[in-house]
Amino acid sequence: MVNEDSFLNLADMTAVRGFFVDNVLGDLDATLAVAENTDGGIYPAGSVVQLFPGEAMVKREAGFSPATNDWEFFELVPSAAGTEIRVRGGAEAVNQFGGSCADCHQAADPEFDLICEQDHGCEPLPIGRDLIELAQQSDPRPRLDAAS
């Protein structure tokens, strides 16, 4: 279901309050309905959530990983050639900084389905919004409109 071609340049995804979403199963409307709901909700299978070009979460089918609400975590290596998957998994996935992806996301309030934002219960990131936006804008992957 999810491979290296599943991950787009952030600019080709849909921005929601500073993060980006897509749906690898084609149900972007259902993903957006949850992402845009400030009261939370359960993301549908196929939902892709990214804050940075080098990390992603993908909601998998029910039963994939009960410990992570069926989210699969990815460490990505984005480049001008596309995306390489370096790490993928459920609760066992460890990011490039040696931390457990699931451990951080488990701190999100239950109604937000492991999605961290400034007010969802997770520890704040140790960098400011300006650096987050700079990282987002530096996504080196090809744009969809440039492929034609």
Image (cartoon, rainbow, N blue to C red):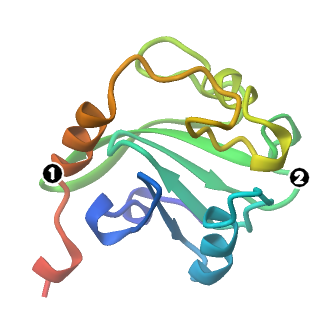
Disc 2 on helix, strand or loop?
A: loop
Percent position of residue 73, x then y = 58, 40
Q: CA distance from mark 2 to mark 1?
A: 34 Å
Q: Quadrant of the N terminus?
A: bottom right
Quickly name the residue at label 1. Answer: 140
Mark 2 or mark 1: whose residue is earlier in sequence: 2
Q: Nearer the viewer, residue 48 or 109?
A: 109
Three-letter code, disc 2 = Gly
Name the residue at the bottom extreme.
Answer: 148
Give the residue at x 81% y 45%: 69
Which quadrant of the structure image shows residue 34?
bottom right
Q: Would residue 57 be found to the left or right of residue 69 on screen?
A: left
Given residues 132 and 103, the one toward you in this image is 132
**Residue furthest top in the image:** 98
Disc sitting over residue 63 in the figure:
2
Q: Quadrant of the C terminus?
A: bottom left
Q: Amino acid at mark 1?
A: Pro
Q: Quadrant of residue 109?
A: top right
> Relative to residue 15, is residue 25 depicted above or below?
below
Residue at 74% in and 68% down: 44
Q: Tag 1, which secondary structure?
A: loop
